[in-house]
Image (cartoon, helix red, strand yellow):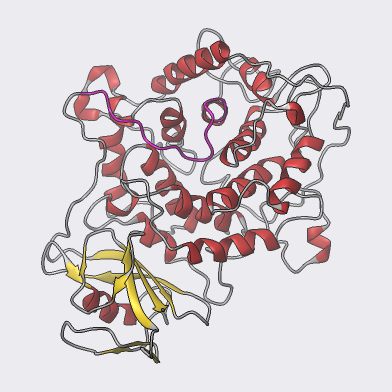
Amino acid sequence: MPVLTTSRLASSRTVSAVTVALAAGALVLSAVPAHATATPAQTATSKSTGVTYLKSLQAADGSYVTGGGLSNEWAFSALAAAGTAAADVTPGGDATKNARLVYRGQLAAAGWPGASPVVTDYERGALNAYAAGIDPARVGPGRNLIADLVAYWQTAEPGYYGPSANFNGTVFGLLALGGARTQSGVKRVPQSLLDASVTTVRANQHTDGGWNYSKAAGDPTALAQGSDIDMTGAAMASLCVGGVPNTDPAVVAAKNFLKGKLISSGAFNSMWGANTDSNGWAVSGLNACGINPQGADFTSGTGKTPLDFLIAQQFKPGGGFKYLPTDTTPSPYASVDGLRAVAGAGFTATPPAPATAGEPAWAASTGFTAGTAARLALVVDDGTAPLKVCAVTLTPTGATTTLGDVLDAAATATPAGCVTSVTPSTGGGTVTAVNGTANSGGSTWKVALDGATATGATRATVVHVGDTVSLRYGS
């Protein structure tokens, strides 16, 4: 059963490589209507009742996070897509237990996400924190989900996050880094970092135009295997979120793969049969790429689209979605996947402003806590070698720190080797060399924080809690 959870975001602990054998018989018909069949009124009703159902999943303590790996926290992505702020979701009207407040506390806890975390834990957290209106890099003074994610950068295989065999960790890493933007809507990491994973996603695209959960790059046999509907939706979304236009051949090939799997009901013929989760992931991929899931390419010969199928899976008036057409009860996971797709979103959504009086647009730490260890994401680009990417852990002495302190702490960063030398090694002056590459002529070291305009790098440059630090050499 495809569900959007930690186990669905496969890790080396939970999911082995998947060999996809897609069911045969996808119905591709030639005469298709050119208009959408799910009307705006139907979509609006689906969104409204879907939100009502997801609100019913909130626990009495305000939580959406359950024990173990199967969690309802993906509800935040669907709620945001449907226009509902997490800060407005409360159990019995108790604003002191609103969903955003409780989720932030869970993410910030020292013991989260457990004794044996994997990269997809942090990717899931970043995507849902963002949708909930929590700055993923500023969850708390000691919790930076962006830094936690980049700590899994694979120096031996640049572009991958986590073990490369679990390719989905890289896809959702790209989705998180490209999609969970700053509070002002800016991509917080440099495009060069996104491009590294875009290249990796391209290399794993199968010859049929799709993807599955395991690594295929460099393996002709794996590349020739049939692809998975779900992962194709996620991978094509990651490309578009990473800056690839929907006219790019890789995105077009993915669209054509999905088009070829459309059946008469408007569903995609997935390896699990027609189901809400697979349809939801595929539609979210189309949404992320700005491709109309109700256009002529995705209208069957009987006039049905993927949105028609999803809305038909929704219980009325309850609002929950069933997983299979034959099911008689709603599934929380299918309801998240279905609602997010119907609402027009990819795998996260910009958080709406809370309607509750006094609730800010964002929940975020505004400064370091002196004496409390904190993490920052650091990207070093000398213009020639593969990027150096790492999570830097330091213990600030005040509400801010300096670039010099960050670079000094990077000597013991994760992964290792991000910064091996800095000139000067003390003081607050201009950074003249990093990792043996020295300023020369018009080429100098510059620093950008959270995607802002790069300026000359000095050791005294002020760095704030949660800043993504990008150090680049060039003109």
Looking at the image, which is closer to me, 343 or 370?
343
Q: Where is residue 394 in the image (x, y as percent from the top left)?
A: 24, 71
Q: Relative to 272, does residue 18 appear above or below in the rendering?
A: below
In which quadrant will I find the C terminus? bottom left
Looking at the image, which is closer to me, 392 or 427?
427
Q: Relative to 87, does residue 398 appear above or below in the rendering?
A: below
Seen in the image, is 325 located left or right of residue 223?
A: left
- Decide whether residue 103 is among the magenta residues: no
Q: Relative to 438, does residue 457 appear above or below in the rendering?
A: above
Q: Give the range drawn in magenta.
A: 341-356
| Identity of the residue drawn at 52% across and 75% down | 155
- Decide whether residue 345 is among the magenta residues: yes
Q: Position of residue 267 (x, y in %)?
A: 73, 27
| Identity of the residue drawn at 52% across and 82% down | 384
Looking at the image, which is closer to me, 109 or 191?
191
Q: Can residue 61 be seen in this view?
A: no
Seen in the image, is 336 located left or right of residue 17?
A: left
| Identity of the residue drawn at 68% across and 45% down | 232
Picture quadrant where residue 58 is located: top left
Picture quadrant where residue 104 is located: top left
Q: Position of residue 281 (x, y in %)?
A: 62, 37
Q: Relative to 118, does residue 393 appear above or below in the rendering?
A: below
| Identity of the residue drawn at 59% across and 73% down | 157
Q: Main secondary structure of the magenta part?
A: loop
Tally of numbered discs: 0
Give the residue at the far front of this rendering: 442
Q: Is residue 397 visible?
A: yes
In which quadrant will I find the N terminus? top right
